[in-house]
Amino acid sequence: MPICHQIWPLMQKYQNFEMTIFNRWGELIYTMTDFSDYWDGSYQGYNCQDGTYVWKIEYEDFLGKKGSQTGHVNLLR
């Protein structure tokens, strides 16, 4: 299941967001700002290695309040 399907129900209360995904070395491998977008487990057209990837979401709600959350996703093929 794409990571977005797990997180999107939580994101419905926000009007703007940016989600970034990083590999184990902290290299940015994906950025999304649209609710219809998702990370397919690839980077620059190649499948990423199995492992743990860190995500960070920065958001703004409909009242202008900003915040962020971080977590991880395990990629298994």
Image (cartoon, rainbow, N blue to C red):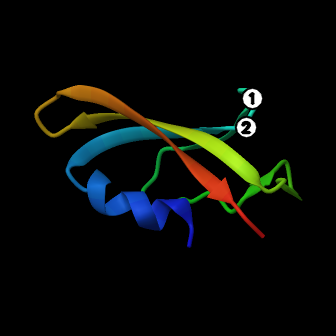
- Decide which of 22, 33 is in the foreground and name it: 22
Which residue occupies the extreme left position in the image?
63
Horizontal placement of 49 versus 37: left or right?
right
* Residue 37 in picture, x, y percent from top left: 53, 59
Residue appearing at x 74%, y 34% in the figure: 24
Mark 1 highlights which residue? 27
Residue 27 on image: x %, y %: 75, 29
Q: Are marks 1 and 2 in contact (CB under 8 Å)?
A: yes
Q: Position of residue 4 (x, y in %)?
A: 48, 60
Q: Report the amino acid beneath label 1.
A: Glu
Q: How many marks?
A: 2
Q: Secondary structure at mark 1?
A: loop
Label 1, label 2: how many angstroms apart (C-alpha)?
6 Å
Q: Residues within 10 Å of mark 1 (few under 14, many from 20)?
A: few
Q: Nearer the viewer, residue 63 or 26?
A: 26
Left or right: residue 63 compared with residue 66? left
Tell me the amino acid under the disc marked 2: Asn
Q: Nearer the viewer, residue 51 or 7?
A: 51
Q: Secondary structure at mark 2?
A: loop
Q: Position of residue 76 (x, y in %)?
A: 73, 65
* Labelled disc at residue 37: none
Write the residue at 25% across / 56% down: 12
Disc number placed over residue 23 in the picture, else none: 2
Residue 22 vertical position relative to residue 73 in the rendered view, above or below: above
Q: Which quarter of the rendering shows the N terminus?
A: bottom right
Specify whether 18 is left or right of 47. Answer: left
* 37 in relation to 56, above or below: below
Q: Could you tell me which quadrant the C terminus lies in? A: bottom right
Q: Would residue 38 appear left or right of 77 to someone viewing this image?
A: left
What residue appears at the point 20 percent right and 51 percent down from the top-left corner? Answer: 13
Counting other residues with Cα less than 10 Å from the Cα at mark 2, is it few (<14), some (14-19), or many (20 or more)?
some
The residue drawn where x is 40% and y is 57% is: 7
